[in-house]
Image (cartoon, rainbow, N blue to C red):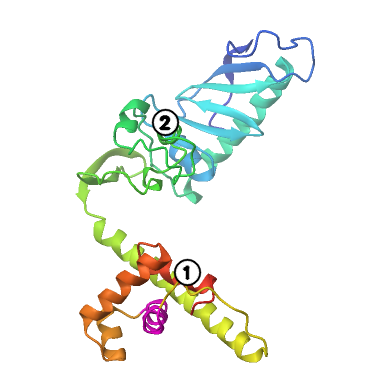
Amino acid sequence: MFIKKYSEFQCIISTFIHPLSDVETPRSKIWSASFRLDQDVCPLFPYINAALDEAVYYEKPEHVRFLFDGYRCFLYPDIIVAHFFESKIAAKDFIAGLIDFLNDIHSQKENIRPNYDQIKQVPIIDILKILPKTNCQKCGYLSCMAFAAAISKGKVSVDKCPDIVSPINENAVYPIFDNNGNLLNSVSLQINTSKLKNQIQEQHEQILMLEASLRTNTQNKKQSDSPLVSEKNNFGLTNREIEVLKLIAQGYTNNEISTILFISPHTVKSHMINIFNKLSVNDRTHAAVLATRNDII
């Protein structure tokens, strides 16, 4: 057994609990517990990080945060702090289960692929400096400050902000192991992921266009089978612009559209500008999606 015992158990009322909390209520979750293990469990951190979906592995000070049995745990090399318990008895019962879990992780190390991805806590104010500070909420948070706080805690990736400045460089950190599989050191190499990101974006746009084309074909079939054709909003598009829009939705490039319609690439570009203006969109994907939703194509 890796961990055999613990010591220095303490169970206190957390200082950030509201002073009016009912301490006498048996089910009030107001107690925080801490205790010391008889082993340094740092080698388990990457395995816990891999085994638990909500685990977060921090670089400095080195520790891992996770949920276990509904309690928030902060695991340091030989100290554990956990919140919030109904009583001291509940805290002691929790310790036994957590130690069993850690021993199980230790015994299953060969079957777990460790995750060495660590979060380096950067001050929120520094993260805020690289954000647009428009509070546009495109990231899903109410403000850039809230988004910066989430990044600092490792809850969200910085690329969730579509308007963030591009990084100067990117690094990949590769682990160096000893013969027993223990992490000795790491090597950081500069990489360039811009090409891969562009490929992913192009594939995403192509998927959206294919989906729009599929919906168009399905709707056209329904309309051909139906004796009643409802009026639709064409947004003032001409017949030629609708033809161009249909080809856009089917994923054709400007040069391909030029060949199909026997018009010059310059004319295709002019049609596209008119289409974007009339639909109030800025790219081909949104134009195709909007046209499909409004039965234009």
- Picture residue at 52% right of the left edge, 26% below the top: 74
**Could you tell me the amino acid type at mark 2?**
Met
In this rendering, the answer to whether 85 lies above or below 18 is below
Q: Is residue 181 magenta?
A: no
Residue 173 image-quadrant placement: top left
Query: Which residue is disc 2 drawn over?
Result: 145
Residue 5 location, x and y as percent? 59, 21
Q: Earlier in the sequence, mark 1 or mark 2?
A: 2
Task: State the extent of the magenta-drawn residues as a range.
Answer: 238-251
Query: Which residue is disc 1 drawn over?
Result: 289
Is any part of residue 267 visible from this angle? yes
Residue 289 location, x and y as percent? 47, 69
Q: Is residue 244 magenta?
A: yes
**Could you tell me the amino acid type at mark 1?**
Val
Closer to the camera in the image, 39 or 26: 26
Res. 214 mark: none
Residue 219 location, x and y as percent? 58, 81
Residue 280 image-quadrant placement: bottom left
- Picture residue at 29% right of the left edge, 32% below the top: 129
The local secondary structure at tag 1 comes to helix
